[in-house]
Image (cartoon, rainbow, N blue to C red):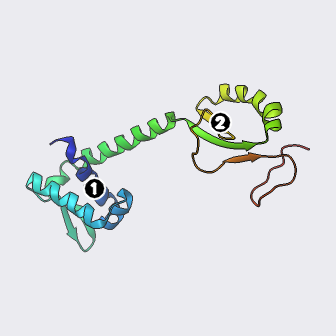
Amino acid sequence: MALSRLRALQAVELALRTGSLKDAAAGLAITPAAVGQRIKALEDYLGTELLVRGRSGLRAAPALAAVLPNLVGAFRDLENVAAMLDMQRGHDIQIAASSDFLALWLRPRLHRFQQTFPDIRFCINGEGDAPLGIGPVDCELAFGASRESGVVVQLFR
């Protein structure tokens, strides 16, 4: 079987893990009908029933029950790999600061911070390591009273 059936296998595994096509659909961000179509297409390809639908929910048919531990383990391994790769991804912080505060206080300290946390990239006032325009500003550093309602932390007087 080619890896082209991976999405169908994912639908089968998630439907069994969650106990319903509806919950599997929510996890895959598709409709329950699409989950059912993926499973049906895989069953047609294999020529055997994979899921048994009953009053108590879904359970593995005999053809699937024999390989279910391998299927569950394979998707658990894929989730672990995805999590490990995500941990290697750089994290972006969008900062807005006045040019004086930036030049006199923040910039001289960034080098030391980046030595300690090399996976964190900064975008300050739309310039820096991080690509421009990634969502809203994470942190606004300002001198004086707050201009907007929100969380205000006083760094120093």
The tag earlier along the polypeptide, 2 or 1, is 1
Secondary structure at badge 1 equals helix
Q: Nearer the viewer, mark 2 or mark 1?
A: 2
What's the amino acid at mark 1?
A: Ala
> Residue 20, can we see it?
no
Instruction: Identify which residue is drawn at 7% across, 55% down.
Output: 47
Q: Nearer the viewer, residue 123 or 3?
A: 123
Q: Position of residue 48 (x, y in %)?
A: 10, 56
Side of 31 relative to 132 (left or right): left
The CA distance from mark 2 to mark 1 is: 42 Å
Residue 136 versus residue 110 in the image, above or below: below
In this rendered view, identify the residue nearer to me: 131 or 141: 131
The residue at the point 16 percent across, 57 percent down is 41
Q: Quadrant of the C terminus?
A: top right
Q: Secondary structure at mark 2?
A: strand
Which quadrant is the N terminus positioned in?
top left
Q: Nearer the viewer, residue 24 or 55?
A: 24
In the rendered image, which quarter is residue 147 located in?
bottom right
Mark drawn on residue 127:
2
Q: As drawn, is 129 to the left or to the right of 68?
A: right
Q: Read off the residue under disc 1.
A: 11
- Residue 88 spot, x, y in % from top left: 50, 33
Q: Position of residue 42 (x, y in %)?
A: 16, 54
Residue found at x 30% / y 42%: 74
